[in-house]
Amino acid sequence: MTLETKRLRIRLLSEDDAPFILQHLNQPSFIENIRDSGVRTLDDARRYLREGALASYAKFGFGLYLVEVKESGEPIGMCGLLQRPDLAHPDIGFALDPPFWGVGYGLEAAEAVLDHAFTELAATEILAITSLGNQRSARLLEKLGMEDRGLVERDGEQVRLYGVRASPRVSGATG
């Protein structure tokens, strides 16, 4: 599975992506807005990939994907779908390295993943969660047409839940 947009390539992760995953998961912004995954070595990163994205691909047919700049092949973050045990529908997750914020890459990647979920995976609804202080992600979710469904508790803290039902979408993604 590879999705392409005007500027991005969104592809399956592999254990070969461990060096990028190691640095990505240890960005202060990732730890602050998402979580500290405890990934500190390349072996930890390979295990994170095996137990996370690779296991999700095998079990659900989707997971987190690597986002890279199409022109250079430079990895800039992740975007994809997660099936959390406490949510009835898959949820979209995204995280880009800070140098790539504010230029529309997050929206471009998330639109392509949503289109893929609704057209290729036949999802009927996609959810999203974000920490209360993460206004940047909340704005992106609203631009995707996701509606704020209120607060829910996850892992002992309040988070905001968003959702969108399947509808015709246009993003320019191919794949």
Image: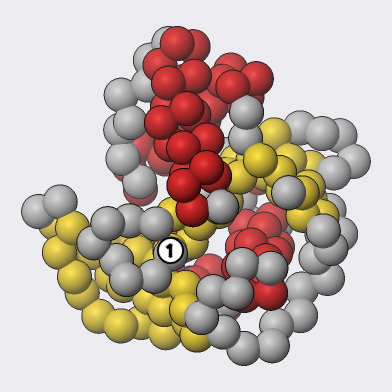
- Left or right: residue 52 versus residue 78 is left
Q: Using residue 143 as the reference point, say whether residue 90 is left or right of it.
A: left
Please state which of residues 140 and 55 is positioned toward the viewer in this rendering: 55
Say what amino acid the circle numbered 1 marks. Asp
Q: Tell me if residue 96 can be seen.
A: no
The image position of residue 138, as x and y in percent, is 43, 69
| Residue 23, image x, y percentages | 52, 23
Q: Position of residue 102 (x, y in %)?
A: 63, 56
In the image, residue 8 lies at what x, y percent? 79, 50
Q: Residue at x 65, y 20 (%)?
A: 16
Q: Residue furthest right?
A: 71
Using the image, determine if residue 68 lies above or below residue 1.
above
Residue at 66% x, 40% y: name it: 12
Quarter-of-image position of residue 91: bottom left
- Picture quarter containing residue 48? top left
- Which residue is pictured at 23% across the width and 61% down the height? 86
- Residue farthest front in this picture: 59
Report which residue position mark 1 lands on: 91
Quadrant containing the C terminus in the rendered view: bottom right
What residue appears at the point 64 percent right and 62 percent down from the top-left corner?
Answer: 113
Q: Is residue 122 left or right of residue 164?
A: right
Residue 20 vertical placement versus 174 (above, below): above
